[in-house]
Amino acid sequence: MRNVLILAAPALALIATPAIAQSTGATDTGFSVEISHDDLDLTTSEGVSRLDTRIRNNVRQLCDTGNRDVASIQAERECRENATEAAQAQVRFAIAEANAEKSRLAAITPTSDNANPGA
């Protein structure tokens, strides 16, 4: 199973940068990037923290217009907020899935020689 989050940046960020949107293949609904978390243990706070850092870094890159005028800065801020909020549901699901898998494995893994009589 491949563990990735799909981080989507809303079209709002594209208002300030239509040329960039066209050159990066963005659509009417925005653009997205996959963030892998195969290498993270999301049952630990360290794993979740690392995933949060990956998300923040990708959101910053996706929403950066490169412009410093007031409208662009506001569009970037709204883009970051919306993309981060949208990613949180996926993060919660990935954490719950990791915890469920850990519990499932714990339930079927013998903890002692007594747990497997006759072996």
Image (cartoon, rainbow, N blue to C red):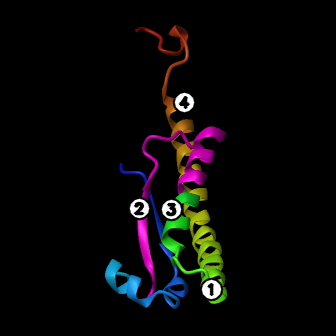
Task: List x then y, in percent, for residue 72.
Answer: 60, 84
Task: List x then y, in percent, for residue 7.
Answer: 49, 67
Label 2 environment density (alpha carbons within 10 Å; few <14, some 14–19, many ≥20)? few
Which residue is located at x 61 percent, y 84 percent?
75
Q: Which residues are magenta?
A: 27-54
Label 1 environment density (alpha carbons within 10 Å; few <14, some 14–19, many ≥20)? few
Residue for badge 2: 34
Element at badge 2?
strand
Residue 30 sits inside the magenta stretch: yes
Task: List x then y, in percent, for residue 4.
Answer: 43, 56
Contact between marks 4 and 1 (CB within 8 A): the answer is no
Q: Earlier in the sequence, mark 1 or mark 2?
A: 2
Residue type for callout 2 = Glu
The quadrant of the rendering that contains the C terminus is top left
Label 3 environment density (alpha carbons within 10 Å; few <14, some 14–19, many ≥20)? many
Q: Mark 4, mark 1: which one is toward the viewer?
A: 1
Q: Mark 1, mark 2: which one is toward the viewer?
A: 1
Contact between marks 4 and 3 (CB within 8 A): the answer is no
The CA span between labels 2 and 4 is 30 Å
Residue for badge 4: 106
Residue for badge 1: 69
Q: Mark 4, mark 3: which one is toward the viewer?
A: 3
Contact between marks 2 and 3 (CB within 8 A): the answer is no
Location of residue 92 with respect to 100 vertically, above or below = below
Which residue is located at x 61 percent, y 68 percent?
84
Contact between marks 1 and 2 (CB within 8 A): the answer is no
Q: Earlier in the sequence, mark 1 or mark 3?
A: 3
Which residue is located at x 62 percent, y 86 percent?
69
The CA span between labels 4 and 3 is 34 Å
Element at badge 1?
loop
Q: Earlier in the sequence, mark 4 or mark 1?
A: 1
Q: Earlier in the sequence, mark 2 or mark 3?
A: 2
